[in-house]
Image: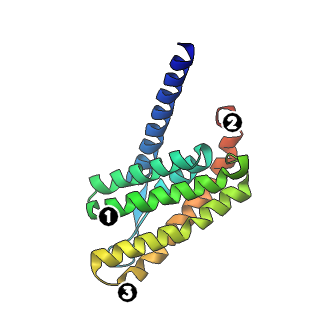
């Protein structure tokens, strides 16, 4: 009985934590964004990418993937980017998973700045390729999506510049130590 109750409590906490990470990614994407005056569709730089990286570094690949996929997918659904939502779900889910998998590899649990940085950097081609294909499909052109690459790179660099130092600080807090 005790073991079942403990497992249920752990699962409940896990669900609440995942939901909070999803909400944090959504809020960081929704309220903290800047439209860039580049490309036909503008481009969007937001702090959701930083929050996705932080979630993946602090809590690993599964929670990072869920936070990115659902949080940013939900943003697309409620903010007029509805056609992008399925692509965002896949691209950001993969991005969160990659960052978390590398940051948590070999028992590191997000404690290695070098591996956290490596994870964020190795997630870049996934985001760039994913959104390139998305735009190619949506716009029917494989040339037009090239104009979005600078905005996507800006978004990633801003996310890395915020997430890596924040991850270092938060990993020192007893609650986030593994």
The residue tagged 2 is: 173
Whether 43 is drawn above or below 139: the answer is above
Q: Write down the quadrant of residue 3 in the picture.
A: top right
First in residue order: circle 2 vs circle 3: 3
The residue tagged 3 is: 143
For the residue labelled by badge 3, is the local secondary structure a helix, a strand or a loop? loop
Does residue 148 appear to the left or right of 177 in the view shown? left
What percent of the width, then of the height, locates residue 128? 48, 72
Does residue 5 appear to the left or right of 34 in the view shown? right
Q: Write down the quadrant of residue 81 in the picture.
A: bottom left
Q: Write down the quadrant of residue 172 in the picture.
A: top right
Q: Residues within 10 Å of mark 2 (few under 14, many from 20)?
A: few
Question: What residue do we see at 70% from left, 58% from top?
Answer: 115
Question: What residue do we see at 61% from left, 66% from top?
Answer: 121
Whether 134 is drawn above or below 58: the answer is below
* Disc 1/disc 2 C-alpha distance (Å): 36 Å
Can residue 136 be seen here? The reply is yes
**Contact? badges 3 and 1 (CB < 8 Å):** no
**Contact? badges 2 and 3 (CB < 8 Å):** no
Whether 122 is drawn above or below 40: the answer is above
First in residue order: circle 3 vs circle 1: 1
Is label 2 or label 3 in front?
A: 3
For the residue labelled by badge 2, is the local secondary structure a helix, a strand or a loop? loop
């Amino acid at each position: 009985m005790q073991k079942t109750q403990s497992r249920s409590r752990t699962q409940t906490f896990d669900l609440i934590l995942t939901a909070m990470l999803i909400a944090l990614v959504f809020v960081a994407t929704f309220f903290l964004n800047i439209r860039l005056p580049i490309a036909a569709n503008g481009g969007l730089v937001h702090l959701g990418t930083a929050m996705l990286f932080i979630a993946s570094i602090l809590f690993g690949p599964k929670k990072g993937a869920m936070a990115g996929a659902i949080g940013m997918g939900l943003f697309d659904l409620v903010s007029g980017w509805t056609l992008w939502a399925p692509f965002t779900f896949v691209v950001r889910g993969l991005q969160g998973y990659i960052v978390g998998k590398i940051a948590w590899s070999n028992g590191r649990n997000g404690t290695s700045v070098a591996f956290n940085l490596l994870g964020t950097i190795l997630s870049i081609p996934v985001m760039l390729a994913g959104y390139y294909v998305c735009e190619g499909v949506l716009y029917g052109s494989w040339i037009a999506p090239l104009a979005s690459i600078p905005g996507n790179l800006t978004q990633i660099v801003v996310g890395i510049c915020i997430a890596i130092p924040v991850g270092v600080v938060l990993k020192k807090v007893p609650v986030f130590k593994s």
